[in-house]
Structure formats: C-alpha cells, structure tokens
Amino acid sequence: MEYETPLFFRVIEYASRADRDVIDMVSGKPDWEPPSAVRDGLSEYATHPSDAFQYPPSEGLFELREEIARRRGVDTEHVVVTNGAAEANYLAMACALERDRGDEILLTDPVYPYYPGKTTMLGGTQSFVPTDATGQLDPAAVRAAASDETAAIVVNSPNNPTGAVYPAETIHSLVAIAEEYDAILISDEVYDRYDLSGEFESALAAKSNHRVVTNAFSKSMAITGFRVGYAIFPPKLAASAKSRHMLVNVTASRPAQYAALNALRETDPEYYDGNRALLRERVETFTDALEAAGASYTTPMGSFYVMARFEEYPGTLENVFRLIDEAGVAGMPGEAFGDSRAAWVRFALVTPRVEAAAERLAAFFE
Amino acid sequence: MEYETPLFFRVIEYASRADRDVIDMVSGKPDWEPPSAVRDGLSEYATHPSDAFQYPPSEGLFELREEIARRRGVDTEHVVVTNGAAEANYLAMACALERDRGDEILLTDPVYPYYPGKTTMLGGTQSFVPTDATGQLDPAAVRAAASDETAAIVVNSPNNPTGAVYPAETIHSLVAIAEEYDAILISDEVYDRYDLSGEFESALAAKSNHRVVTNAFSKSMAITGFRVGYAIFPPKLAASAKSRHMLVNVTASRPAQYAALNALRETDPEYYDGNRALLRERVETFTDALEAAGASYTTPMGSFYVMARFEEYPGTLENVFRLIDEAGVAGMPGEAFGDSRAAWVRFALVTPRVEAAAERLAAFFE
C-alpha cells in the first residue's frame, strides 16, 4: 500500500493549479488560531541568552516532560518529546518490532496511511482488521487476527479518517490483547482534544507494560508545523526509544518545545472548548448539507473529518480531481485509506467555508 | 561500539554534581552569539498569521531549499531540509543501505560515535579505516578496505574529534572510490564554517551520483537546539530520502526553518569570520598552555576540538572524572571515539575560559 503522500500531494498540487476558486478540505491543518501563549512563548524565547539556543536534553526540555507527565499521571522518565506525533509513532513501532516477537503490525481498515508506510520502512508486515461502517473496531476481530507474529497493534482514536471514538471497553480490551500476545498496543491520541462525543478513553487509563501512548500539540494547539509531540513508553521500552530518538534526531526543536511548554501552562480550557464547539458547528453544517444533497456520510464522534459517498460517484483520484474543477471543493480520495473506503471522499473541516463547500457539492450532485 | 550518549551524559552529569567550579569543555555547543537575524526571524515569525504555523512542505520551506541550492550550486529538488545534521546523516546512511549493495559502512577511526550507532540501528555493519596521527585519511587505505559489501563511506571534514581537514585530493579520491564500488560517499560538512586552514573542500566539488553532502546551521549559526540541517542527494536517492523523511518526521520545525532562512539571507560574512577568528585565538591559547604543560596535543585545522594526551594519564572515563574533581576541567574521554584515541581527552573550545582551563590542567599535571 502506498502511504498518503503521493496521493495527498497530487491532490494539493492539482487544486493549486485549478483555474478557479477551490475550497481546500484536503489535509488536517487547523485553520483556527493557536493559543496566544504559543506566540508569546516564541517571542520570549527569541530574547533568551544564546545558551538557551543550544541542545536541550535529547528526550526534551525537562520542564516540558514534567508538565506532560504531571498532566498525564505518568513518570517523567517515561515521556519522550518527539518531532511531532509522526516521530512518536515511528519510535513506538520501531521499538515494538525490535523486541523480536514477530514482525507483524496489526492495523485497522480504513487506516491512516502513514502507519502502513512506516511499517514497510521498518521492515515489518501489515495485517488489516476491518472496522464496521461507523469505524468502530471489534476487539474480538483484533484477537482473532493476533498471533505470536504480532509485534504491535496500532490504533487511532479519535480516528482519522472515520471520526470514530473508541469506547473505554475497546481500549481496555486492546490493551488486554496486547498483553495476551506479548505485543505492544500503540494508541495514537493526537485528536484527543477534538472528542465531540465525550466517549474518549486514553489508553493511559489501562496500566500496562504493553502500551505506548502517542500524542502531539500539532492539532490541539493548531501548530502542525512546529513538530512537538510525545510518546509515553512503558519502562522496558523507554531506553531503546530514547536511543533511537537520539540517533535519528538528537532532539526536537527547542524554540518549538519552549512555545508548546508556555502554551501548555498558560492556556485555559476555554481555548480547547472553543475549538471543539467550532468543529461541532462545522460538522452539523456540513452533514446537514450532505443530507440535503442525498449523500451518504459519516458523523464524526471526534477528529476533523467527514467521509461522504455520492451516488455513482466513487471517490477515486480522478473523481476528486473532477470535484476540484467542477465543484470547487478539494477532498481526499477514499482509496488513500484502504480499499474499504474507496467509494468515499474524506473532507477535512478546517476551513471557515464549510457551508459554501457543502452547497457547492449539493449543486454539483443535484 | 557504544555511541556517544551514554559516556557523554555520564560526564555531563558527573560535572554538574561536582562540588567545585568546573569548566565545561565536553560537548560541541557554541558559546558565541547566533546571528541577530536568527532572533529577528523568530520574533517576526511569531506574529505571522496562523496558517504559517502549519505544515510546511515535507522537504522544507521552498525558499529555504532554494536559498541553500543557490548557495551550494545544486538543484533545489535535491535538497532535503532535515531535523539537524543528525537526521541528514541518518537519511543518507539509510538510503545507502537500502540500495541492496551490501550492508557495510566504512567509517574512520577515530570516529564521531553517532555514525557507528546509526549503522547498528539501521542493521548495517561497521568497518573502520584508521587515520594517521594528525587525523588524515589515506584514500589508498579506504580503497583497500572497500568491497562489494560497501554500502557507504562516511567522512567528516573538518573533523570531530581530530580537527583534521581533508585536502581536495582526499575528497575527490573518496568520491572516485565510492563510484568504483557503487557505494555512496556521505560527507558530513557540519563544521565547514570553522575551517581554520583554508584547505576545506566540499564533496559537492565532485559532481557525482555517488555522494551525499550533509550539513546544518547548528554549528555555523550557533543554534544546535534549533535542529535545522540539510542533505543534498543525487537524483536517484532523493525520492527515497524524501519518503523516509516524511515517514519519520513529516518535516523539520517551521519556526526554526524560518529563523535559519532569515539568518542565511541577512548575515554578513563578517559574522562567520569573527567566530573563526575567536576559535583560532582559543586554539592558540589552549595549545600554548598544553605545550607549556608538556602534554601532547592536536592542533586542529578546523572544527572545535583539541585532543590532548598527558604523560601516564590515559583519557579513561575514570581519569576524566578525576580531572573534573581535581582540576575543574571537563572533557570527553578519548575512548568515546574508538580505541585508537583511548589515551587522549577531547576538549571542546566552546567556553571563554579556555585559558583558565589550560592553566588548571597545567597546574594539575605539574
């Protein structure tokens, strides 16, 4: 399976060359403001003495790790600050494969395409467990797919692209399955601040040496370009994760770490509530219009994405290009997320023009 | 071989717990000021609209890649902006090993310890080619060591830890050897702005599809914590390097990229000349005092480091700890760089107290 990039870039490129106004709903870049403390932190950092511009500890600024550990109720020693959730997931998958327990990574279908891409890069093999129509994952199906070959199970809740949020039972069952097969559950929780359902359960709730939780400030603080994420490792994996992190990156960028730390300390819950409310509104606006247009669609429990399916208009790359040209709306072809959603198109609700986009789609499919 | 970290951290930690004033000459963090345009760039970036805080192109801000390409006389398409030279070297070594030409990486002895660490992590094997007493590398010895198993030859000039700068003949011969064996020469030139000899030759001078040049702004702009580096790949390796970069990191941190771009554009040659002059002065001060103390030492042609050997006082970790406690000077044990320099201690000239350090050492060894 190809990972997201090629398709993703081809869509972005095509949209940018279009001879008309196009509403960009391709990728998960928030269009809302970061906390003001991000900007403040960065300007403040710029005035620091030059020794603050040198290497921080490899695993991250101690105060940032401490702040994360305190909030997440874990030991600071088990937190590694990474170059975004991307590196956090890469480290977690690499460490799981290094354990010599087998080279298989269990993924879901549909899947966030970077996971299979990372698996191949790391020399692992993928197996896909289908989710149901709403994106929910049946732990029994995961247990049936697991074996001695299973190095890791990688899940993402709130989910990209389905918008599913896994209930507590699912998360706890997945941790139990990882324990049963001596595998690692990797729980990517990067959309945790965008849970619209109230159902979100972090895998941290299950005390276990068989789970890694990954996260980032990219989405929660609307700073996808800053590259500050983290992973929380069980004690046995922390050392090898830190080694790999040091050998690949030395450390995450310090100005960005400092800005994220400042924002973590200074940002009120209202900031996150406000973004969630905005997203909820957009989901309603967009799905109402899709409903009126007679399309099938998912109503996300969390994350930024709505998937839509239009009668006799499968979400192929070609059809996505046509939507750009003829409707002026750019989404992601469903095939990017695996065969099961090939008929669908994913729309990211990261534009104030969600209503206009829905109207354009309705007019096109009328 | 262990990579640098454990030893490095143990020394730093030991020095920080010492019950006395210690002059820190352990790691290569410049103590001089970054260009003012780094600070300006960062403060300016902090005021940008929030879409400037989102993902830049994976391979780096286009203007930064263009600026690098223009200065280095290469095609923008072949430049990948990385999370420091660390990631640049990691990508280059990974791509060389992925070519399926053998899994051996030729390194020098002494060696910058991250190279063998990365090799092991990537599933490769190391062979070491000894340099001479001044740190120079004989291309004939490299040719003799090369074989069909050789995936890459990794060199670093100006060199850490020896201070050697390879003459043009060496660099061109190394590229020729890489071509002969269908291997990749990886030339880490991160200290290029600290060539004190005027002898430095970039591997870019040899047009070849068999060399990768890595570099970073970490040392040249005194911003080791920012993590902005780059690699220049031959056309055939660029695509796989970009894929891996995307899958591991997505992109380097954007605020840091922006600050580096601003500094690249706005910084006069005098900035670099001034740092070089400062370093030259420190080398003289430090080696004069070592001479007076009757120690053996290297006079670096470039980079930040002087290696010293004291009569009947080998540079073991234990002896380095004793120097911290009894002389108040912290260096790196030579064994960190391979057996050939186990008798030596490496001192990084990144403190204004170079003279005091030399006097303390002289008094200790009197």
Image (cartoon, coloured by chain):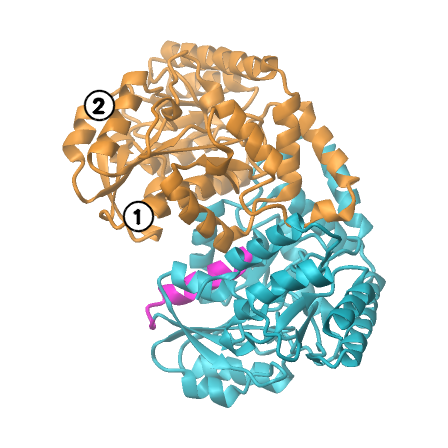
Chain colours: A cyan, B orange
Whichever of labels 2 and 1 marks the residue nearer the N terminus, that label is 1
**Which image quadrant is residue B254 in?**
top right
Marks 2 and 1 in Cβ contact (< 8 Å): no
**Amino acid identity at mark 1:** Leu
Report whether B274 appears left or right of A28. left
- Residue at x-position 54% and y-position 85%: A173
Residue topped by disc 1: B97
Image quarter hosting the N terminus of chain A: bottom left
Q: Secondary structure at mark 2?
A: loop
Q: Which residues are magenta?
A: A86-102
Q: Which mark is residue B138?
A: 2
In front: A15, or A55?
A15
Q: Chain of mark 1?
A: B
Q: Compute the Cα span from label 2 to label 1.
A: 24 Å
Q: Position of residue B130 (x, y in %)?
A: 22, 29
Q: Main secondary structure of the magenta part?
A: helix
Chain of the residue where label 2 is placed in the rendered structure: B
Same subunit, tags 2 and 1 = yes
Amino acid type, mark 2: Asp
Q: Position of residue B355 (x, y in %)?
A: 51, 15
Furthest toward the left, the residue is B144
